[in-house]
Amino acid sequence: MRGIGLLLPLVLLISCDGPERQLHRLQRDLLKALPEGAVFLLKENKDTVSLPLPPTAEELTLARDFATEARQKVLAIDPQKLSPQERSTLTRLRAVIDSLSTKPSGALCDPVRYVPLEVLRRPLPPALLVSLVDTLPAYYAAVHERWSAPAPARIGPAVEQAVQALDELTRLEKNMETMPPKLQARLASTLPAARRATKDFIGLLQSNLMVE
């Protein structure tokens, strides 16, 4: 009798662990397994700009290991026992876990995010804008250090963004007479290296496309 009493809580736990709870648990565990998202922080006086960095190789490995282990769990969830909304969530979750288990860099590395085109177009304080241009070589070097090949479909849009970033650097050069003389001189001295770094990033993207 005592043995039945000890087993009863376990039986109740198993019976309560339905497909909805399994789905929600996997969602929660997936969020914990994904990289937190490192940033390259640029400061100029009291102004700051944060540029995203790719996940490290170690973070990609951890995400792949989780997905490999979770793959059978997510396949075991019966979609017929879920609500229509939860079935849709399960479909997306299966796709994400499948992608992470096969090629995590394809799922987690979006090279468009590593082209600071939108930041270059912001109405930033002139000193911060010049610091951003000055920092581009170091930023792209940090991206390259963490680089893993993205999904091929993401490479083309990133190349287009990078080409537009080059155009934006040209626009800044043409309009720099609106800046104080010291900032003009600093921008003029940093633009060549910023262009080279951007072109090198385009070359990196294109080389990944040729490999694929």
Image: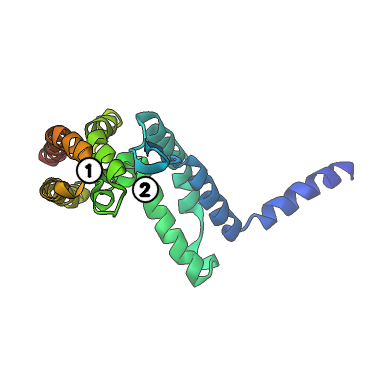
- Left or right, 196 with respect to 119, comes to left
Whole-percent x and y of residue 101?
A: 37, 41
Q: Name the front one of labels 2 and 1.
A: 1
Which of these two is toward me, 99 or 9? 99
SS for callout 1: loop
- In front here: 21 or 142? 142
Q: Position of residue 2 (x, y in %)?
A: 89, 42
Taking the image as drawn, is residue 172 in sight? no
Name the residue rendered at 46%, 59% in the picture. Answer: 90
Which residue type does callout 1 highlight? Pro
- First reached walking from the N terminus: tag 2 or tag 1: 2
Residue at the outermost front position:
181
Q: Quick check: 192 left or right of 151?
A: left
- Badge 2, how many Cα within 10 Å: few under 14, some, many 20+? some
Residue at point 27%, 34% (across, down): 139
> Against 46, is 8 above or below?
below
**Does 44 sit above or below residue 11?**
above
Image vertical order of residue 149 relative to residue 58, above or below: below
What residue does disc 1 label?
180
From the image, which quarter does the C terminus lie in?
top left
Residue identified by numbered label 2: 98
| Rendered-image quadrant of the N terminus | top right
Along the line of sight, the residue nearer the viewer: 97 or 52 = 52
For the residue carrying disc 1, how many other residues have a C-alpha within 10 Å: few (<14), some (14-19), or many (20+)?
Answer: few
Identity, as a three-letter code, of the amino acid under mark 2: Asp
